[in-house]
Amino acid sequence: MRYLTSGESHGPKLITIIEGLPSGMPLLASDINEELARRQKGHGRGRRMQIEKDTVEIGGGIRHGYTLGSPVSLIVENNDWKHWTKIMGQDPIEEDETEIKRKISRPRPGHADLNGAIKYGHRDMRNVLERSSARETTVRVAAGAVGKKLLSLLGIKVASHVLEIGGVKANVESYESIEKLAEISEQSPVRCLDPIAEKEMMKAIDDAKTNGDSIGGIVEVIVEGMPVGVGSYVHYDRKLDAKLAGAIMSINAFKGVEFGIGFEAARKPGSEVHDEILWDEQNGYTRKTNRLGGLEGGMSTGMPIVVRGVMKPIPTLYKPLNSVDIETKEPFAASIERSDSCAVPAAAVVAENVVAWELACAIIDQFYSDRFDSLLENINKHREYAREF
Ligand SMILES: Cc1cc2nc3c(=O)[nH]c(=O)nc-3n(C[C@H](O)[C@H](O)[C@H](O)COP(=O)(O)O)c2cc1C
Ligand SMILES: C=C(O[C@@H]1CC(C(=O)O)=C[C@@H](OP(=O)(O)O)[C@H]1O)C(=O)O
């Protein structure tokens, strides 16, 4: 299964085409819109989120609430486009339209601007920033929501929460159930399970905004119900942990990823890292602990998958950073019009959906069928086989 996306941040629309979904899978626009609305929330977002109200139009691939097995195309309109029709217009422009032609020649530190301009030969860096913007995560979430729907129909649940913002850590040792975790994080303006940390996180975001600064954080995605043995140890590009790490790292501003106890493993002896194997009649093989986050040898262990990602602070700051104008080569202090001061809560939703997509792809690869009903049958047979192994 794969998807491509197209669209610029202030262009008319964002589009994704998903190929490889089985036929006969229930799928509604509302399944996707729910995830899109979740991505738009969170304390610390800028004015753009008040302009947009992301919903999908289904361009093809679905009939009467079920997938057809043909490519599914999803389209999200940019409400902001109406303010940008001249600057982002697709037709050639006249020589004297200087206002519209004004080029962005000042690269913003921390963005794709300078490297992208050099790579593609753009002297107007708008040609870079429009596509490198995290606006594109809208349609990545739309595709991820389809993956998440497929997983849920197979009994696999995905949820996320925020562990840290601007150095404020949530005190979360355990969670009651994945449903409860999803419910509590959904109610929090920063998607945090710890009510004390939640308030401190919100204050940290407000302080950063007041100071013209920005802050990052850590998000955690948890997956329950994955069958054992998905992914593979036999070749590098079939390793499930590598795919999940790539998916997290592909989110704008993400700079690190870890599974289970993650980097802490470097500081502990093996006896405190590896998960002892247990067996009982009802469940088959399980683990005494889940320090390795549900992954061993590039495959799922059947325990919950626990993956975390680190988001750097938003690079566009009201407090200007120094840069160099590519036309004059003169230094300047970057000034900006609008930006998020913290997008960690929104990024948790993005992380949840890119993880769901990757797992859905791995499941389709392994239990392949053109039909959803036999995909479900294949996975259930595998679950039974693993239990009796
Ligand atoms: C949900 C989300 C919202 C973001 N909003 C902004 C923003 O308002 N302003 C900004 O400068 N960067 C924002 N970013 C981060 C930039 O898109 C990102 O840092 C930039 O594209 C450079 O990519 P890199 O940080 O991965 O190297 C956001 C990222 C995410 C995931
Ligand atoms: C539009 C979204 O996020 C945008 C991501 C972003 C960036 O540079 O990544 C910059 C901002 O764009 P704008 O300058 O239009 O306000 C954010 O609002 C979104 O998440 O839907």
Image (spheres, rainbow, N blue to C red):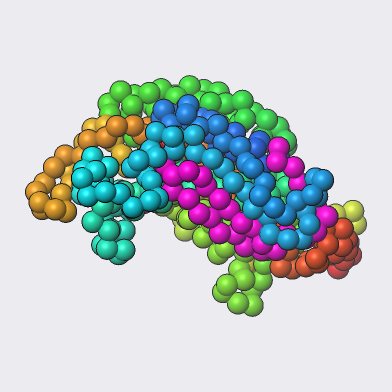
The structure residue drawn at horizontal position 22% and vertical position 35%, both measured from the top left corner, is 335
In-front residue for pair 257/38: 38
Horizontal arrangement in the rendering, residue 287 relative to residue 82 (left or right): right
Magenta region, residue range:
1-30
The residue positioned farthest toward the bottom in the image shown: 234
Which quarter of the picture shows residue 242?
A: bottom right
- Name the residue: 59% across, 46% down: 75
Q: Looking at the picture, tell me which residue is in the foreground, 134 or 11.
A: 11
Estimate the x, y position of residue 31 in percent, counting from the top left.
71, 40
Q: Is residue 71 left or right of residue 217?
A: right
Residue 193 in view, yes or no? yes
Image height of 47 relative to 232, above or below: above
Q: What is the quadrant of the N terminus in the image? A: bottom right
* Residue beneath the point at 38% across and 46% down: 89
**Which is nearer the eye, 7 or 111?**
7
Identified at 38% across, 38% down, the residue is 84
Q: Position of residue 313 (x, y in %)?
A: 36, 40
On the image, the x and y values in percent for residue 38 come to 59, 34
Quadrant the C terminus occupies: bottom right
Judged from the image, the quadrant occupied by ligand 2 is top left
Left or right of 67, for residue 11? left
Was residue 4 drawn as part of the magenta stretch in this picture?
A: yes
Q: Position of residue 378 (x, y in %)?
A: 85, 64
176 relative position to 270: left or right? right
